[in-house]
Image (tube, grey):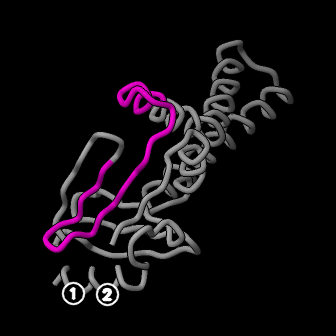
Amino acid sequence: MKNEYKITKKIIMSWAKEYTLFGWANITVFVLWCLVGVIGISMIILLSIGGGEAINWYLSILFVLLSVFKLFFSRSVVWSNRYKMLAKTYGVSEWTRTTEFADEEIILTDHTSVTKLKYENIKKIKEKGDLILIFLNNNLVIRLYKDAFVEGSWEECKEKIKSMAK
């Protein structure tokens, strides 16, 4: 079975949105940055009412600006830089990602980069609409799309994974 799709800047930026509240660590960080923003806004309100020194104003504004950046913009910056790095490494602005489920191993090909993985390393599989996420022991995630199978189907692939991952 083989899954194949094009990697573009648009698709990578869509992934950035998916990871905002993905997993307990990201949720915890999200909540903490919300608290920093609330603290900054609270400080601004208190300083507006009672007055305060310039350093207090700077800190409160810094808290608000940092939390806004971390909550709304940092993921886009990180994923955009990740795309630029990969595009520069591969020397192309778009490339094909192929995931082949061979008899002995899973072969991931990103343009010219090839990675081979063992079926035994699969921890779990998560399906969300057309998206399939295969989680491996080493915190690697294989991303597939149900409609991107060029050989076989997702149902056939899932059966093969279940039989091989034992």
Residue 82 lies in quadrant:
top left
Contact between labelled residues 2 and 1, with CB atoms less than 8 Å apart: yes
- Residue that appears at 53% across and 45% down: 12
Closer to the camera, 100 or 20?
Answer: 100
- Residue that appears at 57% across and 48% down: 11
Compared with 116, 77 (above or below) is above
Q: Mark number for residue 48?
A: none
- Residue that appears at 52% across and 54% down: 19
Q: Percent position (x, y) of residue 79?
A: 51, 38
Closer to the camera, 145 or 53?
Answer: 145
How crowded pointer 2 is (Cα within 10 Å; few <14, some 14-19, many 20+) is rated as: few
Q: Percent position (x, y) of residue 149?
A: 45, 69
Q: Percent position (x, y) of residue 41?
A: 74, 37
Q: Which residues are magenta?
A: 84-109
Task: Spot the residue most to the top.
Answer: 54
Compared with 85, 14 (above or below) is below
| Left or right, residue 138 beside residue 82 | left
- Helix, strand or loop at disc 2? helix
Compared with 27, 145 (above or below) is below
Disc 2 marks a residue whose amino acid type is Glu
* CA gap, disc 1 and disc 2: 6 Å
107 inside magenta stretch: yes
Q: Give the quarter of the figure containing the N terminus.
A: bottom left
Residue 129 lies in quadrant:
bottom right
93 inside magenta stretch: yes
Please give the residue where the numbered disc 2 appears in the rendered image.
Answer: 159
Please give the residue where the numbered disc 1 appears in the rendered image.
Answer: 163
| Left or right, residue 38 beside residue 32 | right
How crowded pointer 1 is (Cα within 10 Å; few <14, some 14-19, many 20+) is rated as: few
- Residue that appears at 59% across and 37% down: 76
Disc 1 marks a residue whose amino acid type is Ser
- Helix, strand or loop at disc 1? helix
